[in-house]
Amino acid sequence: MIQQPEPRLVLASASAARRAVLEAAGIGFTAQAAAVDEAAIKASAGAAGLPPARPPCCWPRPRPSALPGGIRRRW
């Protein structure tokens, strides 16, 4: 039987908190943080008049009348 190599997880973040969570869970990983200046990107987007990004939990929900077929759902 041929053994498959253990899957490798790449943590694409410099976050010490994320690293600690993976280490506490006993998950092996390699950390490779991207060289991205997030503050500069946010400043550039703000200067261009773009609104700040919001996580999906904060996205506006569609009104029931806007759903296909006028289906009503309870949120």
Image (spheres, rainbow, N blue to C red):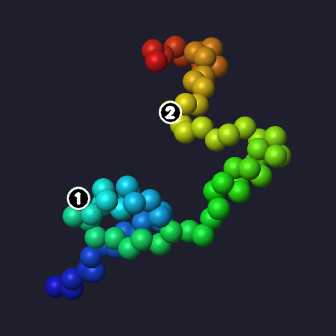
How far apart marks 2 and 1 lie (CA) works out to: 26 Å
User: Where, by quadrant of the figure, is residue 26 drawn?
Assistant: bottom left
Is 26 placed left or right of 41 in the picture? left
Residue matched to label 2: 57
Relative to 55, does residue 62 appear above or below in the rendering? above
Relative to 20, does residue 3 appear above or below in the rendering? below
Q: Nearer the viewer, mark 2 or mark 1?
A: 1
Q: Nearer the viewer, residue 60 or 24?
A: 24
Q: Residue at x 62, y 65 (%)?
A: 36
| Residue 3 locus on image (x, y percent) | 21, 83
Q: Residue at x 23, y 58 (%)?
A: 25
Identify the element where label 2 is drawn.
helix
| Residue 31 locus on image (x, y percent) | 42, 71
Is 54 placed left or right of 14 in the picture? right
Q: Nearer the viewer, residue 37 or 70?
A: 37
User: Where, by quadrant of the figure, is residue 2 drawn?
Assistant: bottom left
Residue matched to label 1: 25
Dot 2 amino acid type: Cys
Q: Residue at x 34, y 70 (%)?
A: 29
Answer with mark 2 or mark 1, whichever residue precedes in sequence: 1
Dot 1 amino acid type: Ala
Residue sticking out furthest to the right: 48
Q: Nearer the viewer, residue 5 or 18?
A: 18
